[in-house]
């Protein structure tokens, strides 16, 4: 009986639906693990088909192709080298399962299915899959492996059952999306408890990369049975690490290895934005991105994120001044583009504004100028940017933050036009924090320059849409520190008006913000996707009816 094992953990990106491509990358990784002398290589949850697959798994053709590719992977293990743990989808007795297969010696030697199916927030697995029974361990080269899958370790039953049935090492494959502070919760709140409670070491492997609104941070790790951290993989990077395991009097343990530092706050948020945008653009085949650069902080931060994600040569910024655009904004936009090293075009919109005024003058003759004319300017900008996108191919990035999207301070078919929004889940106060951080630091996965990339004046000046003379955001909204405090309560914590008033906010202000939040749901339904950062993003997490009459105060 072997008393040592070398297990390679492949913290990889995936492409949902690219079964052949995912399989090819696994075989390449297996070859590297073979050369490193590994006995086993492990891949993240559903790595063969990509996670989350959503309703793609309802297509019989996808299931059939995944099964065929899994058999090919199994046959590849007939040659010298490590076995493989591969996550995929499986059909048993007519039921569809999220599962993992152990491939070794040229065949599929075992399969285990996920028992706990998450059905909250971003997860809809209970809608798609049938839960497996409590899984038994599998024997691999002298070691009894327990194979809980992602959600399985967030509950006690699966790990307790596996330990009772003789599991000596837990290997948990995951597709765990990034959320603020989630890495601490995974390690201290879940994994350490399972290892200590059962006396079984636990290896936690997570995927990296972006998939639509989700960013996966990796940050995989190994916890020994005493709760000590034996290995910590970096976040936001594709890496493979070989871990060495030894059997002693107290059972198996992982020999302590590298402990990589995880990104501090707010670098973690920034990296999530970079990862989400990068993979959305690259996996959908866009040559680059287009951004309306206004001279304000939101578009400046989006431009910085885009450059860090894609490189300056794939980012095209466009300034679209109107008669209300200040020289200060023109100068700030130019300085930002220069600092980032991106192309900047300037296209004045006044000719189009004049054209619309003439088109509508008869019907608008007896009406005062109001927000309608402001929105026309925004929509002219949207049409212009989309024309450039259509003509030249780059995807248009929208730049509205979560504070604005919450209360509808955005123009549908105007500044909301585009394909993806990196700031969709970032409140305005977070935008300021990120801009200040980016000027002091460069993200470890960034492609942009170091130093001040967002001119200090952009951060310091009062935010304005510049759609009428001397306009400021606070003419229409409370100060952002107040607004964001109210929105955190209403959105993230589902608090009532009375609760927020009890916390010190003015009732009239809270009532107005709650009303705007509900009235703006129809806009958010038509907004582009954006990377999830917190626990209640608009879209996958928070699903409210457009039409309803409930108010809490």
Image: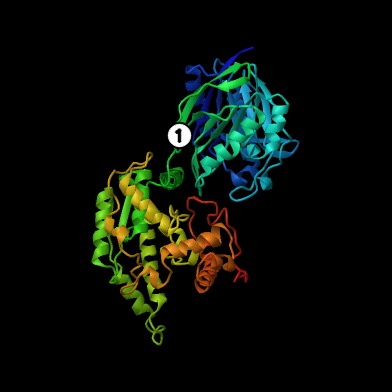
Q: Secondary structure at mark 1?
A: loop
Q: Does 156 sit left or right of 237 as displayed?
A: right
For label 1, count other residues whose C-alpha is less than 10 Å away and answer few (under 14), some (14-19) or many (20+).
Answer: many
Q: Quadrant of residue 98?
A: top right
Q: Residue furthest top?
A: 1
Q: Position of residue 277 (x, y in %)?
A: 43, 47
Q: Does 493 sit left or right of 418 as displayed?
A: right
Q: Is residue 148 visible?
A: yes
Q: Residue at left 51%, top 59%? A: 488
Q: Position of residue 167 (x, y in %)?
A: 67, 25
Q: Residue at left 31%, top 55%? A: 317
Closer to the camera in the image, 522 or 106 = 522
Residue at mark 1: 234
Q: Quadrant of residue 264?
A: top left
Up-down relation of residue 266 to residue 156 (above or below)? below
Q: Quadrant of residue 64?
A: top right
Closer to the camera in the image, 476 or 254 = 254
């Amino acid at each position: 009986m072997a008393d040592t094992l070398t297990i390679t953990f492949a913290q990889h990106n995936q492409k949902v639906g690219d079964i052949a491509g995912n399989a090819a990358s696994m075989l390449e990784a297996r070859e590297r693990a073979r050369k490193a002398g590994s006995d086993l290589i492990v891949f993240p949850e559903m790595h063969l088909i990509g996670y989350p697959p959503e309703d793609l798994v309802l297509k019989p053709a996808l299931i059939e192709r995944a099964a065929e590719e899994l058999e090919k992977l199994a046959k590849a293990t007939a040659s010298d080298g490590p076995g493989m743990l591969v996550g995929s989808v499986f059909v048993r007795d007519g039921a569809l399962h999220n599962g993992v297969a152990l491939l070794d010696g040229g065949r599929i030697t075992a399969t285990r299915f996920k028992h706990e199916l998450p059905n909250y927030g971003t997860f809809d697995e209970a809608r798609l899959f049938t839960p497996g029974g409590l899984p038994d361990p599998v024997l691999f080269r002298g070691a009894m492996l327990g194979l809980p899958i992602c959600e399985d370790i967030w509950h006690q039953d699966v790990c307790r059952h596996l330990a009772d049935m003789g599991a000596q090492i837990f290997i948990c494959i995951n597709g765990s999306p990034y959320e603020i502070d989630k890495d601490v919760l995974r390690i201290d709140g879940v994994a350490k408890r399972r290892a200590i409670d059962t006396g079984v070491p636990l290896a936690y492997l997570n995927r990296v990369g972006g998939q639509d609104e989700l960013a996966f941070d990796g940050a995989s790790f190994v916890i020994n049975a005493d709760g000590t951290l034996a290995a910590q993989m970096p976040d936001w990077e594709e890496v493979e690490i070989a871990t060495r395991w030894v059997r002693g009097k107290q059972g198996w343990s992982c020999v302590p290895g590298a402990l990589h530092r995880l990104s501090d706050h707010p670098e973690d948020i920034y990296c999530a934005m970079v990862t989400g945008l990068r993979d959305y653009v690259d996996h959908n085949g866009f040559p680059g991105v287009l951004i309306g650069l206004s001279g304000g902080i939101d578009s400046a931060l989006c431009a910085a994120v885009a450059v860090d994600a894609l490189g300056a040569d794939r980012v095209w910024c466009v300034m679209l001044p109107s008669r209300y655009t200040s020289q200060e904004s023109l100068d700030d936009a130019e300085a930002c583009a220069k600092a980032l090293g991106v192309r900047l075009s300037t296209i004045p919109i006044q000719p189009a504004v004049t054209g619309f005024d003439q088109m509508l003058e008869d019907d608008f003759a007896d009406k005062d100028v109001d927000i309608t004319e402001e929105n026309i300017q925004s929509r002219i900008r949207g049409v212009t940017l989309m024309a450039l996108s259509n003509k030249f191919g780059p995807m248009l990035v929208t730049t509205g933050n979560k504070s604005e999207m919450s209360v509808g301070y955005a123009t549908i078919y105007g500044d909301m036009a585009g394909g993806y929004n990196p700031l969709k889940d970032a409140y305005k106060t977070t935008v300021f924090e990120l801009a200040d951080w980016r000027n002091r630091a460069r993200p470890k996965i960034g492609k942009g320059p170091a130093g001040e990339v967002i001119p200090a004046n952009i951060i310091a000046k009062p935010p304005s849409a510049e759609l009428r003379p001397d306009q400021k955001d606070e003419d229409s909204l409370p100060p952002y520190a107040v607004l964001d405090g109210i929105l955190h309560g209403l959105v993230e914590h589902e608090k009532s008006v009375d609760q927020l008033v009890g916390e010190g906010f003015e009732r009239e202000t809270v009532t107005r913000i709650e009303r705007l939040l509900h009235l703006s749901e129809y806009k958010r339904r038509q907004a582009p996707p954006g990377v999830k950062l917190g626990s209640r993003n608009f879209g996958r997490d928070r699903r409210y009816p457009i039409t309803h009459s409930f108010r809490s105060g």
